[in-house]
Amino acid sequence: MKLTVARIGRAHGLKGEVSVELHTDIPESRLAAGAVLDTEPPTAGPLTVVRTRTQAGRWYVTFEELTSREDADAARGVELVVDEEESEEDDAWYLHEIIGLRAERPNGDLVGEVVGLEHPPAHDLLIVKEPGGTRARIPFVEAMVPEVDVAGGRVVVDRHRRDARRRLMRLDVVTIFPEYFEVLDVSLLGKARAAALVETHVHNLRDWTSDNHKTVDDAPFGGGAGMVMKADVWGAALDDVLQPGAHLIIPSPAGVPFTQAMARELAGETQLVFACGRYEGIDARVAEHYADAGFRVSEVSLGDYVLNGGEVAALAMIEAIARLIPGFMGNAQSIVEESHEDGLLEYPSYTRPASWRGLDVPEILLGGNHAKIDQWRRAQSEQRTRERRPDLLG
């Protein structure tokens, strides 16, 4: 019997590299450099792995036999297979073996049915369809999935992590500059990804073009300066990226203002997709189409100024939203005390030394009377808001 290790997806670049959809829990072994894999259909192979890499949760493979974009396009949909007896680990399993398994809590209560597996950078995610139809993404780590019993037809999901499971948010970014988002791997956001609080995927819009030049824009109807990003390319990308219930965010200087209240609302979503436009923006029919299709679509402005593209705005929004997810910030109280959380700007802050270059910390902060300190901070917040942002006071 042949077992599917992976399925070849879209071509990536011009030299034959392809994305792959994994169907095994040991891709590092199955897709090791030098591995020779049979294919289904058999006429497409065998294929020899030259190298692999991962980016934004996707696996990419270069095969010795695929040397051009045309070769890669022709291989799309080909399955990479091995003989069942080649399994190297007693506890290894393949995707087809876990699909359909009952997901249950340690006490036997039903969680749902396993319907898939995803491979973001931090952890694999087990996709479980709950009785009501909701799809839960469960970090596939021992603490949350302590047992996979293929023979018994079940996987065990730790009920004590149920709340954390439900807080996992997926953030997708579609852009022509994916390298812009490498900063998602650093600071608190990088730690949140590693802790499976948030999952991020960055997609190159040009992967959905169909011409040799990877064209994403064209001249505007009616004339005018600049170029407009093409609806057909964006449609192909968003058809693949948007999942049921997703909220599409289009950064735009013509959008509604992004606020802390909006960030808090968006922090409760399960998937946010940021469509980063360039030039004169994205063809207006894209937003219209996906709104008509039942998706929530928001054109959002970071402020009353113009940027070269949506990438800077998307990064700012992602950080503002992600830091509101429970567990993201080490001290939840720090969020409550920040500017805009209560409609006021935050009070000034000080630390040691108490005197610096002739400037002293306000005496009230050194006395330890917390009631008076709270009163002082409130007064400072109100004064700052009156002076700098009177519009917030109505």
Image (cartoon, rainbow, N blue to C red):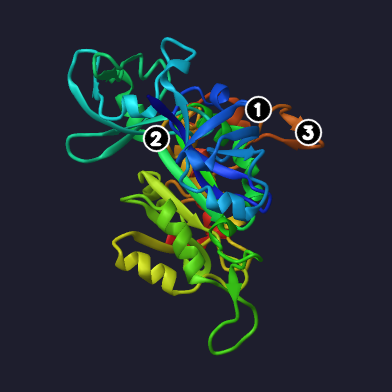
The amino acid type found where label 2 is placed reads Leu
Image coordinates of residue 34 in percent, x first then y, are 65, 27
Task: Name the residue rendered at 29%, 19% in the picture.
Answer: 155
The residue at the far top in this view is 90
The amino acid type found where label 3 is placed reads Trp
Image coordinates of residue 168 in percent, x first then y, are 39, 35
SS at mark 2 in the image = loop
Q: Which label sits on residue 168?
A: 2
Q: Which label sits on residue 356?
A: 3
Name the one closer to the observer, 275 or 151: 151
Tell me which corner region of the image, top left, top right, bottom left or bottom right, holds residue 354: top right
State which tag comes first along the sequence, 2 or 3: 2
Q: CA distance from mark 2 to mark 1?
A: 33 Å
Pointer 1 residue: 33
Name the one closer to the observer, 295 or 64: 64
Task: Name the residue rendered at 47%, 12% in the picture.
Answer: 89
SS at mark 3 in the image = strand
- Residue 103 vs 118, above or below: the answer is above
The residue at the far right in this view is 357
Which mark's residue is nearer the viewer, 3 or 1?
A: 1
Q: Assess disc 2: are there few (<14), some (14-19) or many (≥20) residues with their C-alpha within 10 Å of its C-alpha.
A: many
State which tag comes first along the sequence, 3 or 1: 1
Image coordinates of residue 29 in percent, x first then y, are 56, 21
The amino acid type found where label 1 is placed reads Ala
Q: Which label sits on residue 105?
A: none
Name the one closer to the observer, 67 or 383: 67
Q: Assess disc 3: are there few (<14), some (14-19) or many (≥20) residues with their C-alpha within 10 Å of its C-alpha.
A: few
Compared across the picture, whether 187 is left or right of 376 comes to right
